[in-house]
């Protein structure tokens, strides 16, 4: 049976330039060199459907945490013809502050979330400062409100949410980090989100230091590799190289097509 082929977009909405390589790896890395981090949401389009992956940080959180906001997520989506107000499916890869703000921007959406991520974000792990500092309590309250509004679709592991499009529980980085596998013209692309922040994390098997379970993170790299058709088919969550390596949407340098082959 032929798989559908979707368009897949990575949309950069913010950046943080004042960051060194040593801050992006768990195990000692002797690089004091700058290694900026970018912030993305993603969009999947095809088969008459639009799926948004992650909702980005809220303007208040961005200001409080000193990130350079470039576009609001809804403006970025608008640039590729997606009206956030009408999107029916939003995947929340995990509930960290930079992935799960702005619930109100998607008033029609069902939100796809792993059981284990909700348990993580509302349970005993949040008694520890090192874990809860990566979340915003108002975002978690927003998630709970959506549960009570009947708008969260919970998953426990692998789930197909559209023909050929599936969610995969990775864990490791947070309690229930999930990644999204999408069939495209160039094969299986995996939107890893924070299952690997940079290509360098997965390539050197040296995780990003914000981590709940090191072993699961390392095993997660193997899952990502088994799901994707090659190393370039795994799209990391925060890597500025994504914008450099894939063709931009004309007129929008912060938006690239990751369903198309990398440049050069
Ligand atoms: Zn994260
Ligand atoms: Zn993140």
Image (cartoon, helix red, strand yellow):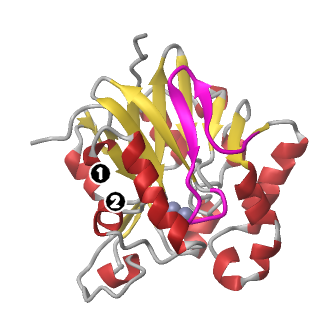
The percent position of residue 242, horizontal first and vertical second, equals: 29, 51
Q: Is residue 40 magenta?
A: no
- What residue appears at the point 24 percent right and 85 percent down from the top-left corner? 31
Q: Position of residue 187 (x, y in %)?
A: 31, 29
Please state, as top left, top right, bottom left or bottom right, where the C terminus lies in the image. Answer: top left
Name the residue carrying label 1.
242
Residues 215 and 73: in front is 215
Can I make out residue 111 in this image?
A: yes
Residue 176 position in % (x across, y down): 65, 57
- The residue that appears at 76% across and 75% down in the rendered structure is 126
**Which residue extends farthest top?**
1
Q: Quadrant of residue 191?
A: top left
Range shown magenta: 154-176
Q: What residue would you read off at disc 2?
A: 239
SS at mark 1?
helix
Ligand 2 neighbours mark 1 (CB distance < 8 Å)? no
Dot 2: what SS? loop
The answer to whether residue 75 is above or below residue 31 is: above
- Tag 1 near tag 2, CB within 8 Å: yes
Give me the disc on residue 213. Answer: none
Residue visible at 61% across and 65% down?
A: 174
Tell me if residue 217 comes above or below residue 169 in the rendering: below
């Amino acid at each position: 049976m032929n798989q559908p082929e979707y368009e897949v977009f990575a949309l950069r909405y913010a950046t943080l330039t004042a960051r060194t390589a040593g801050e992006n790896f768990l195990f000692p890395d002797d690089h004091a060199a700058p290694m900026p981090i970018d912030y993305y949401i993603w969009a999947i389009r095809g088969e008459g459907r639009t799926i948004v992956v992650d909702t980005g940080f809220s303007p208040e959180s961005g200001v409080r945490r000193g990130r350079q906001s470039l576009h609001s997520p809804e403006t970025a989506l608008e640039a590729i013809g997606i009206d956030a107000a009408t999107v029916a499916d939003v995947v929340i890869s995990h509930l960290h502050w930079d992935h799960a703000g702005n619930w109100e921007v998607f008033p029609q959406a069902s939100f796809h979330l792993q059981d284990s991520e909700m348990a993580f974000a509302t349970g005993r792990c949040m008694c520890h400062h090192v874990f809860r500092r990566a979340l915003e309590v108002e975002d978690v309250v927003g998630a709970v409100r959506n549960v009570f509004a009947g708008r969260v679709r919970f998953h426990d592991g692998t789930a197909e949410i559209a023909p050929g499009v599936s969610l995969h529980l990775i864990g490791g980085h947070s309690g229930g980090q999930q990644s999204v596998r999408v069939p495209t013209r160039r094969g299986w692309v995996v939107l890893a989100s924070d299952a690997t922040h940079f290509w360098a994390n997965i390539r050197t098997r040296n995780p990003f230091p914000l981590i709940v379970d090191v072993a699961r993170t390392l095993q997660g790299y193997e899952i990502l590799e088994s799901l994707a058709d090659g190393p370039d088919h795994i799209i990391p969550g925060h890597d500025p190289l994504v914008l450099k390596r894939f063709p931009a949407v004309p007129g929008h340098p912060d938006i690239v097509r990751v369903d198309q082959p990398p440049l050069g």
